Image (cartoon, rainbow, N blue to C red):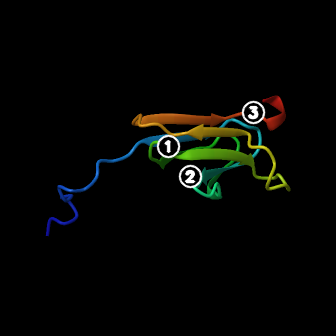
Amino acid sequence: MLAGYIQPSDAPPPGPKLHVRNRLPETAEVFWVHPTTGEEVRLIELKAGESENLDTHPGHRFVARLAASPDPAALPVGSYTATASASQAFHHRGHPREG
């Protein structure tokens, strides 16, 4: 009866949140980078000016790439490694050639 209102006492505490904002004038994709294989797993697509909150864990690595790039090996436009901080921000805004 109360199952929807009570969490088990052994439930893990909520993890850190990562606020991702696209400050580019074009659409970008955000990928989580697998820590062992380096494989990039697509999480979200953000149009110019859009933002999204993601659940994360310390050490998770993220990269952002231009969605329109024909080359999947193109340099990322931003990268971020999550910390234990409860609230974090990853605002990608530069083109790879800008450094």
Residue 14, position in %: x, y?
33, 47
For residue 55, side relative to residue 2 (left or right):
right
For residue 97, side relative to residue 40 (left or right):
right
- Asked whether disc 2 touches disc 3, contact meaning CB atoms under 8 Å apart, the reply is no
Task: Find disc 1 in the rendering and name its residue.
Answer: 59
Q: Nearer the viewer, residue 77 or 34?
A: 34
Q: Quadrant of the N terminus?
A: bottom left
Q: What secondary structure is found at the residue carrying circle 3?
A: loop
N-term mark: 2 or 3: 2
N-term mark: 1 or 3: 1
- Asked whether disc 1 touches disc 3, contact meaning CB atoms under 8 Å apart, the reply is no
Residue 31, position in %: x, y?
63, 52
- The amino acid type, in three-letter code, at marker 1 is Gly
Task: Find disc 3 in the rendering and name its residue.
Answer: 94
- The amino acid type, in three-letter code, at marker 2 is Pro
Q: Residue at x 39, y 36 (%)?
A: 86
Marks 1 and 3, how far apart in space? 23 Å
